[in-house]
Structure formats: structure tokens, C-alpha cells
Image: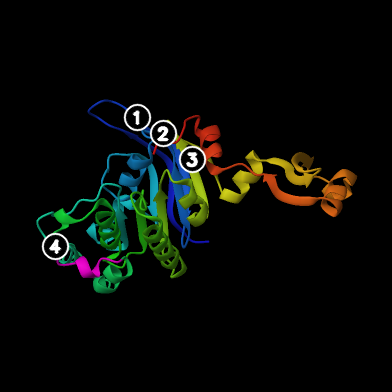
Amino acid sequence: MEKVFEVEGLRFTYKKNGVEAVRGIDFAVRKGEIFGLLGPSGAGKSTTQKILTRLLKNYEGRIEYLGKDLKEYDNTFFEDVGVGFELPVHFSKLTGAENMAFFQRLYKKNADVAALLKRVGLYEDKDRRVGEYSKGMKMRLNFVRALLNDPKILFLDEVTNGLDPKNARIVKDMIREFKESGGTVLLSTHLMNDVEELCDRIAFISGGEIREISTPRDLKIKYGRRELSVEYYENSETKLETFDLDKLGENERFMDIVKNRTIETMHSGETSLDDIFIKVTGEKIHE
């Protein structure tokens, strides 16, 4: 599969404080995938995204974008990129429509902004000043801004943070549709439900180093337990037994429960991505 970004030996040190935020990481982002870059605060996620979007340039290592050294691109590179970082930056005294019109002028190619505003439920508020918007409305407007140049790749950070379930679902559906149309997404979030729903592969980064890269499914298999817990009803009470998944169909006790008891619940030993995050990075998730 074609690689959109290929990163080798990436390092970056902030000159002001001498902190090495990224310490020799290697990864690739494939065309048409949603790639999650996950880690605790200060792990190097934001620095890596800023390097890939060319906001930070004095890095060591090699980065190729579509097979060409990232340093060789001029400002036409930004025509391909849509960015929606966690803290929305808008002109608060301008309306939503005026904000989008301003940013549209920065690009040669434009998407149908009216259609995007309708999709995220902001069209009726497009003539209100952004300073009057709620946090959720600002987040949705920020997402529209990331799409207004019809980009090839999206960089999204906490894209559903602050959204109610209905609007979060709309945004996630739009991200999937972007992918299905051939777009590529680099997603950073602390919301593991979003990761599980959206990401094809994820990279855990901690202390400026990538600890692991895999699919959510393979990570759950690797860190989960191969067992099945069964709750069943017997003698007017609920009982719980746990069985090894290997040769489960040959386990006489399990088969007896399935055939002769009223099953209330069954749960595999699959671990959550939250637990995997903690195991791999050694840190808890901070919302």
C-alpha cells in the first residue's frame, strides 16, 4: 500500500529548554488509513504532528511525503493538508461564515463550505459571531475549517472533545467518509472509544519514543486474556464461572452450563484500549 508519510530516525529538541521531545522514532502512515498517534501529555505527539505539518522544521532524521523529502516541498504542500487541533482558533468578532470565507482565501481549492456547515449543524448559526458560540459549536466549526480546502490528509487532535454524542457521531461519520473517499487521517485523542471506532492502526508514544504500533484488534489479542466468563442463573441466584478459550467446545462443564442453565451474560477476557494505553505507556489517561 502506498505510503503518505514515511518517518525514519525522527528527533527534535526544543532549543529554549533543551528538551528532546522526539527521540528517534520510525513509522509510516499509509494512504487511505486512519492512523492513531496516542500517548500521555508531553509524550511527543503534538511535536510530531507539528513537524509533519511543517510548523516545526529543525528536526533530525528523514521524512518523506508521497515519496519525496518533506523539506523539498514549497508552500503548495499546505494545499494537501487539513488541520484541526484541540484548541480552536477563530476570529471571535467575525461570524462563522466570515471566518470560513477568510480561511478559504488561503487556498486555491475549496470544498462546499455551506454543505459542511449544514452537515455539522452550524448552517443556521453561520451569521452569528463566533464569540457567541459554545465550545461544542467552536469545535465543529474547527472541524469544518480542516476540511474547507478539500485536503488529502487530515491532522486531527481531540476532534470530538466537548461534543455531545449526536454531534460526535456526525463528526466520526464524516471522518470515515473522508477515509472511504481516499483521504488519510492522523488522529490524536485520549478518547479510546474514538480510537476503537475509527483507527486502522495505532502508535503508542511515550517519552518521545514509539512503544508499539499495531491494529486495535491485534493489541487486544496480545494484551487480553484467553478466557470466557459466564454468568448464569441457578437455584435462584446468579453464579459466575470462567473458562479457558482453548478447546472450549470440549469443556464438559461449560457445555453443561450452556445446555442446562439460563445464561445471563458472557464476556471474553478482551482488555480495553484504556488498559492497553496504561500498560504500554506506563501512564494513566488524562482527559
**Looking at the picture, which amino acid does disc 3 mark?**
Phe
- Residue for badge 3: 204
- Residue for badge 2: 208
Q: Position of residue 175 (x, y in %)?
A: 41, 62
Distance from disc 3 to disc 2, alpha carbons, whole Å, reads 10 Å
Distance from disc 2 to disc 1, alpha carbons, whole Å, reads 8 Å
Q: Position of residue 283 (x, y in %)?
A: 47, 30
Classify 10 Å Cα crowding around label 1: few (below 14), some (14-19), many (20 and above): some
| Nearest the eye: 19 or 127 | 127
- The residue at the point 86 percent across, 54 percent down is 259
- Residue for badge 1: 20
Depth-wise, is mark 3 or mark 4 nearer the camera? Answer: 4
Whether tag 4 and tag 1 are in contact, CB under 8 A, the answer is no
**Looking at the picture, which amino acid does disc 2 mark?**
Gly
**SS for dot 4:** loop
Nearer-N-terminus badge (2/1): 1
**SS for dot 2:** loop
- Residue for badge 4: 95
Classify 10 Å Cα crowding around label 3: few (below 14), some (14-19), many (20 and above): many
Say whether residue 238 is magenta: no
Residue 224: quarter of image: top right
Classify 10 Å Cα crowding around label 4: few (below 14), some (14-19), many (20 and above): many
Q: Magenta residues? A: 121-128
Distance from disc 2 to disc 4, alpha carbons, whole Å, reads 39 Å
